[in-house]
Amino acid sequence: MYIERIQVEDGFLDGLDLHFKPGLNTIIGARGTGKTSIIELVRFGFGVSGHTADSAKRSQEHAMSILGEGQVVITVRDGSASFTLSRAANGTSKQERSGIRAPIIFSQTEIEAVALQPGGRLAMIDGFVQGQSKDEEKAVTAEILSITSQVTNYLHEIEELQAALAELPELLKQLSELKPAEDNLTRISADASTKAKSFNTLTLHLSQLAVADSALVRFTQQVDRLRSALAEVTSSKAPIEQWPVGAGDDPLQTERAELSEIQNILRAQLKRLTDVSRRSSLAAQNLTEKRMPLEAQSRAVRKEIESLKAGAGEVSRQGQQLREHIAQVESLKQLTEAKAATLKELTYRRNQLLESFDKIRDKRFQSRQATAALLNKSLGPRIRVTVEKAGHNQSYSALVAEILKGSGLRYNELAPLVARSLSPRELLEAAENSDVEFISEATGISRDRSMRFISALRQTDLGRLGTVSLEDAVSLSLLDGKDYKSIEELSTGQRCTVVLPIVLRHVNRVVIVDQPEDHIDNAFITDTLIKAIMERDPNSQIIFSTHNANIPVLGSADYVVQMGSDGHRGFPMVHDSLEAPAVVNAISTVMEGGADAFKRRAAFYSGHRSRA
């Protein structure tokens, strides 16, 4: 696939109509004639963003200033078929076929910037990886976030239930201590004994009713929460939007009917929940009606007992309250066990998803590593590419710092330490399990700081930890003498020396570079850049704008365009093959090293043949 034609309406390049070819296409001309403008309009037409935020903004502004009120139309050739895409300054765009793969485009300043940015280097490697979709990762991420939210809720609920159950030993102790007084009350008289037995029977019955009442309250609350959530979902009265007239056949006719059916089902279920809530409230009311006469009877018996002995009523009241409280607490055991079982199932499911998440990232790392190996094979030993698994943890560190803000901990020191010492999954599980010792041992911080750290973590959405971006780190190095130097240690020209050959290895993509000779010398152009150009498939396409004659001459350009300008409009003065007399004249007279480049050509090819 290659760019066959570019047409421009309006603006500085109004009337431009260029036909490009497979192979090396070069755009030459004096400064201000529109060479860079052509490249930026191609970028604009394809909707390709700049490699940095600044370059993206500059590219957009450049394209808009050149285009005026017009549009750019690009024709793409794919085998025997051709397709067009157009984009106007007002934002409207049209593409005849989806899935047209955009070219790789670099402006003058982007090559160095990309080399210095971890994300830029990673994007360069990912450009070689075919079929790399993040849809599966997004789906797994969404499910992990959802399940982790449920896990957090269950953990809090179980902790609250366990706190309530922790009262049981003290309640049983108080009841045991009260037992002698109750026994003494029973022995006062036969009448008192009979009444005490009656009172105990009533107390037991009231305790059972209290447990039932608590269960009814919890059930009603659960139904009301569900009913409230469903009411919010079905509250919208807006009708389903119909397919616009004049937009062709409705591809969503079945889905629209299905959506309507789903809405009706949800409203019907909301009505059922309302009925359930009403019936549960009625059951609670019936239970209250049963309790009231029993409580009255219990009070009457207690008064009778009090009349037999001073203080007996207080002993009876305490016993009744303790037994009722104990019965309520013991009833929470079953609920706690049920929630713990659900929590176990959720945690197991999330662990499976986290393993799937790791496998997706492992597969991506392996693809990147394989790409690096191929690049090293073709560009080594002078250029070396390495990929470190999960070596770029800035996003992880930034998330930990964000969580710790306001905690009183020195997050700028602690966040990088945690990111180096613990994987996101380890930190997630340690936070959920309140594993203070694990965090303290892994990071070397005190137990007190670990406890405060866990406290801060548990107040946030822990799902973000399990799915935080932990990208692989790409390193680029250049052999300088006997030693390799990393890209950060290199000069601007040396950085371009590393990046340009990597970019040109994209043999299955159209590669467009604005003035690739900037910051590099003729020796690199001859020894490396031209070699990379000539090693590409002749059917693949490169488009360079350049002032250096060595690029079109030594690179045996298939097509050369010389741009000119009258100060108001840029236009092609010459557009032909390299051997055309007009092209030879243009290169010889307007380009840096023009005549000399043709002299070098014979020596260059002679040298390559002698080494072959």
Image: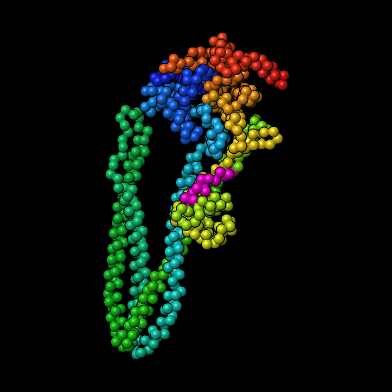
Q: Answer above or below: position of 600 versus 327.
A: above
Point out the image quarter for the C terminus.
Answer: top right
Q: In the figure, 365 relative to 596: above or below?
A: below
Which residue appears at 64% of the width and 34% of the height?
478
In front of the other: 31 or 136:
31
Res. 156 visible in picture: yes
Q: Residue at x 42, y 75 (%)?
A: 171
Side of 87 where 114 appears, left or right: right
Above/below status of 120 relative to 141? above
Taking the magenta stretch, the answer to whether it contains residue 433 is: no
Residue bounds of the magenta highlight: 389-403
Image coloring type: rainbow
Question: Which of the two residues, 208 or 26, is positioned nearer the viewer here?
Answer: 26
As drawn, which residue projects farthest toward the bottom? 189
- Residue 309: give x, y in percent of width and height: 32, 88
Q: Residue at x 33, y 85 (%)?
A: 311
Q: How many marks?
A: 0
Choose top left, top right, bottom left or bottom right for residue 497.
Answer: top right
Q: Is residue 425 visible?
A: no
On the picture, is 56 further left or further right than 367?
A: left
What is the x, y in percent for residue 281?
A: 29, 62
Residue at the limit of the structure toward the right, as seen here: 610
- Where residue 207 appears, x then y in whole percent? 36, 73
What kind of secondary structure does the magenta stretch mostly adopt?
helix
Q: For the view shown, which residue lies furthest in the top direction?
A: 581
At a point 55% along the width and 31% down the height, the residue shown is 111
Can you give x and y, in whole percent of width and height, for residue 20 in the image? 51, 18
In which quadrant of the rendered view does residue 522 lie? Answer: top right
